[in-house]
Amino acid sequence: MSPSFEWDLVKDAQNQRKHGVAFVDTQVAFLDPARVIARDLSHSKGEPRFYCFGETGGGVLTVRFTYRGDVIRIFGAGYWRRGKKIYEAHSKVPR
């Protein structure tokens, strides 16, 4: 079964302007067999939040998200150097 995704349309538009990434395109990062999921300790006050670092056609994408039941809710995404470093250090699938 594939995961379901959701996001706020306003945040999606803001993310596209700021980082050039549409939330619909972030789903590919979750399909990467070498993806790395890490807890977002600095933003997990009200609910647990996470990062997904995954390879996409444009490079290693960092996606900020939470789980709401069986749904993955996207908060933000971008191609950031720090995310690529974490991915390369922790990816479990040999490249």
Image (cartoon, rainbow, N blue to C red):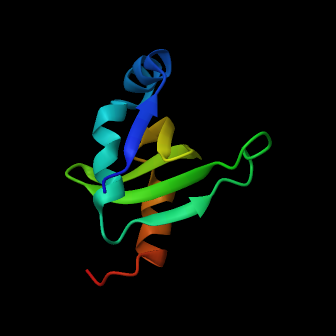
Q: How many marks?
A: 0
- Residue 69 appears at what percent x and percent y? 56, 45
In this rendering, would 93 be left or right of 72?
A: left
Residue 42 visible from this viewpoint = yes
Place of residue 59 in the rendered image (x, y in percent of width and height, measured from the top left): 28, 54
Whether residue 79 is situated above or below residue 82 in the rendered picture: above
**Quadrant, the N terminus:** bottom left
Most extreme residue toward the bottom is 94
Relative depth, front residue between 25 and 81? 25
Seen from the viewer's position, the closer of residues 80 and 63 is 63
Going 48% across and 15% down the picture, which residue do you hit? 10
Picture residue at 48% right of the left edge, 37% below the top: 74
Tell me residue 44's x, y (percent): 74, 47
Q: Is the residue 54 above or below the residue 68 in the image?
A: below
Position of 52 compared to 34: left or right? right
Q: Quadrant of residue 60?
A: bottom left
